[in-house]
Image: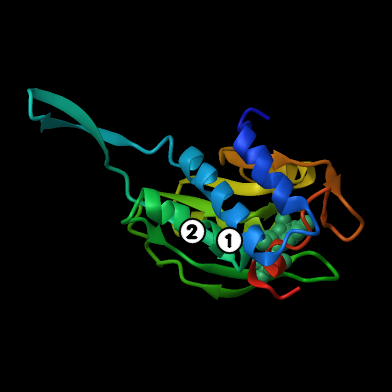
Amino acid sequence: MSNVFEINHVIVKHYLSILRDVNTDISCFRQALDKLGLFLAMDLTGGLVTETVPIDTPLMPTEGAVISEQVAVVPILRAGLALVQPFRELLPEVHIFHLGMYRDEQTATPVPYYNKLQESPSVDSAIVVDPMLATGGSAIAAISALRKRGIEKISFGCVIAAPEGIVNLQEAFPDVPVTACSIDDGLNDINYILPGLGDAGDRYFGTV
Ligand code: PRP
Ligand code: URA
């Protein structure tokens, strides 16, 4: 899986351990997810296109590299909202395209309920974010919606990915790179990730 990346960093392992723990309270859960979002935002913005610009330092002229690509971060609601703020910190002008969908509890298929994508998006690329990639259904639906609107350069970032979701996503969109803080063991019989962290949205928003 050459297009799949797992972030290997001790801080990531530390905050993942807090997230996974059933005894972590909502405040610490939010803090941990916010921290991991920063690692994802750093990783997923690493390939943005830059242009060379002349700069005068106080000492001499030199050259710098500034981002020349218009990018949108696309959170899959609800839980994806938790991963938007780090992108805003790194890229204050980032576009934010909201896509709402929830998994049907019986079939685990995504049910769309909100779409704030522009019909003809004015961005060069999109970064789709969601804390969890389980079966991959939600990510595939989100990326399909972006491709239908003409966005070709797309990447996907999550905190925890199941191997099954990665395979499904790669089959549907082999050119979309996937970055995860952890690739876990697999799915249980109701399509929750093992060991996972439970329901990311419920734990982050306090609706358990
Ligand atoms: C969760 C998660 C993903 C989806 C992953 O959302 O945040 O969007 O499930 O599962 P999949 O890969 O099998 O599609 P959920 O449906 O719980 O909605 P929520 O974000 O509102 O909690
Ligand atoms: N969504 C979650 O929030 N957790 C899972 O384990 C699977 C889907």
Residue drawn at point x = 67 percent, y = 66 percent: 26
Numbered disc 1: secondary structure: helix
The location of residue 66, given as percent across then percent down, is: 25, 38
Q: Amino acid at mark 1?
A: Gly
Above-or-below relation of 62 to 132: above
The location of residue 187, given as percent across then percent down, is: 85, 50
Residue that numbered label 1 is attached to: 80
Q: From the image, which quarter does the C terminus lie in?
A: bottom right
The answer to whether the residues at label 2 and label 1 have Cβ atoms under 8 Å apart is: yes
Does label 1 point to a residue whose CB lies under 8 Å from ligand 1? yes
Marks 2/1: CA–CA distance: 7 Å
Please give the label number shown on residue 47: none
Which residue sits furthest right?
189
Picture quadrant of residue 174: top right
- Residue 123 seen: yes
Q: Amino acid at mark 2?
A: Val
Image quarter for ligand 2 equals bottom right
The location of residue 163, given as percent across then percent down, is: 77, 41
Residue that numbered label 2 is attached to: 84
Numbered disc 2: secondary structure: loop
Q: From the image, which quarter does the N terminus lie in?
A: top right
